[in-house]
Image (cartoon, rainbow, N blue to C red):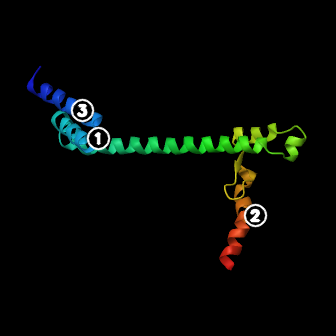
Amino acid sequence: MDELSQAVEMLLCITRSEIADNNPHQALASLLHVIRLTRGEDAILHVLDEAKRKMTVDIDEAIMQSKLHEAHRISALLLEQDTVLSESGQQHILRDAFEDGSSVLCSKCGDLVSRARWEAHSRYWCDSASLDVQDMET
């Protein structure tokens, strides 16, 4: 093993150790030194940009998963409530509307609204939106 390979292995061991010891700044410094040795100074910005892009994608995915989880939770709550549909044994209509994505849940009033009618609902029909307008007028 040549000197460069040995130096890289040592720095990677240090990086792992710093991660295990919960020292992210030191781990990053060691890792950047590895990149500098193996790929050159110019590669550092590229690697950091790629890491930032991946982190953004991961965060966006986590937010989407959280929203999906919340939608399922609200869907289950709505399906448990006594509604005209549940009284007539047709609660599957609500479940289907959630699952196929044709409808959305208004975060202001809790109504299930057709995706195609969402804008009109939020402007003209949402009870909570009209309360917001009244609050602003007073």
SS at mark 3 in the image: helix
Mark 1 or mark 2, earlier in chain? 1
Q: CA distance from mark 1 to mark 2?
A: 49 Å
Which residue is the site of mark 1? Answer: 47
The quadrant the N terminus occupies is top left
User: Splitting the image into 4 quarters, where does residue 73 fall?
Assistant: top right
Please identify the residue farthest to the front as the structure is shown: 21
Q: Position of residue 37 (x, y in %)?
A: 15, 35
Q: Nearer the viewer, mark 1 or mark 2?
A: 2
Which residue is the site of mark 2? Answer: 127
User: Splitting the image into 4 quarters, where does residue 130 fall?
Assistant: bottom right
SS at mark 1 in the image: helix
Q: Amino acid at mark 1?
A: Val
In the image, taking residue 28 as reference, residue 64 lies left or right, namely right
Q: Which mark is residue 64?
A: none
Q: CA distance from mark 1 to mark 3?
A: 21 Å
Q: Amino acid at mark 2?
A: Asp
Q: CA distance from mark 3 to mark 2?
A: 56 Å
Which residue is the site of mark 3? Answer: 17
Q: Is residue 67 above or below residue 39?
A: below
Residue drawn at point x = 21 percent, y = 43 percent:
42
Given residues 101 and 33, the one toward you in this image is: 33
Q: Nearer the viewer, mark 1 or mark 3?
A: 3
Q: Is residue 130 above or below residue 107?
A: below
Q: Are marks 1 and 2 in contact (CB under 8 Å)?
A: no
Query: How crowded is the residue under tag 1: few (<14 C-alpha within 10 Å), some, or many (20+)?
Result: few
Q: Position of residue 76 (x, y in %)?
A: 72, 40
Q: Position of residue 14 (x, y in %)?
A: 20, 33
Please identify the residue farthest to the right as the structure is shown: 88
